[in-house]
Amino acid sequence: MVRADARENRARILAAAREAFAEDGDASMNQVAQRAGVGPGTLYRNYPSREALILDIYQDEVGRLIGAVPELLAAHAPREALRRWTSDLVGAMRTKHAFGAALSPDAHKSITAQTYGPVIAAITELLDAGKGDGSIRADAEPGDFLQLTGALWRAAPERSQPMLALILDGLGVHPSGEVSG
């Protein structure tokens, strides 16, 4: 069982690292430790390498995204929930790729393998809700949706929302029940 102070240190380190890396992608581990208010020993005990810290930040972000699906569906119609969730996913993809230079090819492969299934499950839940209320076409596939939205993180930030709107329009069903397009 992890002690409460150890959990708090880890949470502070993750929050500090997110901030530090957002300000400067080359922030050092010592800068992260200082910002978190912990000593280097505490930082390295929790994260033996910069790569381990970055992977945990990304894993934490994916966990937050996946955990947000039920709340989004409770607060919004399925297509709007999908739009909001996908916007957050694109942000997480941008973050992951911004850290690209700090991650080895094996680490990229590992994090993708660890997160693919849960992300597909979240997309499935969102699409199924839309299929259930008739706002999303019945033949929409989670893997196809993920592949299409994968291009959004590469787009200029001001283009990602218009491009997402096109993707979501393609998921729509006409009032007659026919698929759009």
Image: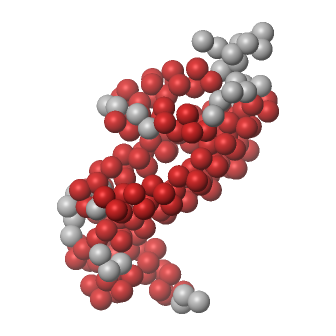
Q: Is residue 172 visible?
A: yes
- In the picture, measured across the screen, residue 90 lies left or right of residue 154, that is right
- Asked whether 23 or 117 is in front, the reply is 117
Q: Quadrant of the C terminus?
A: top right
- Name the residue rendered at 58%, 20% in the picture: 169
Pinpoint residue 65: horizontal percent, then vertical percent: 55, 52
| Placement of 83 over or under 177, stated as above or below | below
- In the picture, measured across the screen, residue 40 lies left or right of residue 62, that is left
- Name the residue rendered at 22%, 77% in the picture: 30
- Name the residue rendered at 42%, 62% in the picture: 110
| Placement of 176 over or under 20, stated as above or below | above
Q: Quadrant of the N terminus?
A: bottom right
For residue 2, what is the image quadrant? bottom right
Q: Is residue 37 visible?
A: no
For residue 138, what is the image quadrant? top right
- In the picture, measured across the screen, residue 160 lies left or right of residue 119, that is left
Pinpoint residue 66: horizontal percent, then vertical percent: 60, 53
